[in-house]
Amino acid sequence: MTRFNAFNLFAKALGGHKSWPEQWPDARPKPFYDAIIVGGGGHGLGAAYYLAKKYGIRNVAVIEKGWLGGGNTGRNTTIIRSNYLYDESAHLYDHAVKLWDGLSQELNYNTMYSKRGVMMLAHNVHDVQSFKRHIHANRLNGVDNEWLTPEEAKAYCPPLSIDPGARYPVLGAALQRRGGTARHDTVAWGYARAAAALGVDIIQNCAVTGIRRGPSGAIEGVETERGFIAAPKVGVSAAGNSSVIMQMAGLQFPLESYPLQALVSEPIKPVFPCVVMSNTVHAYMSQSDKGELVIGAGTDQYVSYSQRGALHIIEHTVAAICEIFPIFRRMRMLRSWGGVVDVTPDRSPILGKTPVPGLYVNCGWGTGGFKATPGAADLLAYTIARDEPHPINAPFNLDRFRNGRLIDEAAAAAVAH
């Protein structure tokens, strides 16, 4: 794996100097890029890769305050699916699923994408009606989704209990067979290596402290802990911190940040063949390639930038898992963690241009960020390169919060993740 060294990359930008001092010497030219991507997760690194690969824009810098993939990219539960209700969401997430399908070959790096299927359980009449509505809407958009009886659901996932006397009995399930999982951080490393090979500079441990705008209001570059970096275009793709960075440019965004929790069990032999999700008891689970049961919980009920959430959320989730899958009641948990997600009022992302010329944003994915990774990266690159949104991401603009044309997956989603 290539080691990305901030000092060497800045030296490259400065014309081959082997080192550089803490403060930029006035006589030395500042590094200048055609575009800067703020955020070294899967979305940001992917956008840099597609800028270089598809549009020939290789003089690009990716700036990351920590290490590559150390934010939400490395703190998710790896689920990939596109069975969203609204047309705009279905097109967006299915674009990502199609890119996931060939991503390992594209990057020559194994992302461990596994089309094992995503099954959503129905526990009451409302769930049944809601999922069947999703299935019909998905099929109209060319997205696969099908209804399973309780017996068919158990046949697809044998550990599932379909006891009719359970507190939340399984009345059926919706199954997207193309859905599945991928290894969470490999997508970041795969994009990083591929982007670097095309000439993209990747600068780690370098937090952005400000966004500089010229007299006309247009972007001139970013201020960082290591000095100013000039660029006429800046794309912000920093999950959990997007609203803070937008404030640096004088913009207020309709975002709130919440901790989102998950945990894993001790590793066991392969026993769980797919992804199972339940909105009624709010829990979802899959099994990793290492044998751990990966269990997802919900977002906390309070805003926070903490990467550790409330204990009662985990307690509720584990209780739900034990009811749906009684065979796992004696499993021991290894660790839990949290990521910080940006959430919009309609729980749909913001992906496109901002009112500031030269400033682009990719944020507000909430719990949908990982599954959208290649699609969001591809569309952000398109928007930056052409200074206009792609038809797929055009509806996900800021104006929808002014004109009321919301893509309200918050009310429509069968499950939050």
Image (cartoon, helix red, strand yellow):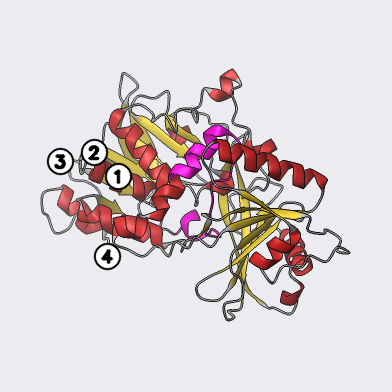
As drawn, the label of residue 55 is 2
Front: mark 4 or 1:
1
The amino acid sitting under disc 1 is Tyr
Q: Residue 246: x and y, percent?
A: 46, 34
The answer for how far apart the CA atoms under marks 2 and 4 are is 25 Å
In the picture, measured across the screen, residue 352 lies left or right of residue 75, that is left
Crowd tier of the residue under label 3, counting other residues whose Cα lies within 10 Å: few below 14, some 14–19, many 20 or above? few
Instruction: Mark 4 or mark 3: name the one nearer the start of the chain.
Output: 4
Crowd tier of the residue under label 4, counting other residues whose Cα lies within 10 Å: few below 14, some 14–19, many 20 or above? few
Residue that label 3 marks: 29
Q: Quadrant of the N terminus?
A: bottom left
Q: Residue 282: x and y, percent?
A: 72, 55
Q: Residue 121: x and y, percent?
A: 71, 55
Residue 320 vs residue 2, the one in the foreground: 320
Q: Residue at x 42, y 48 (%)?
A: 98
Q: Is residue 268 above or below residue 77?
A: below
Regarding residue 33, the answer to whether it shows in the image is no
Residue that label 1 marks: 50
Q: Are marks 4 and 3 in contact (CB under 8 Å)?
A: no
The amino acid sitting under disc 3 is Pro
Q: Residue at x 35, y 24 (%)?
A: 357
- Region in magenta: 70-95
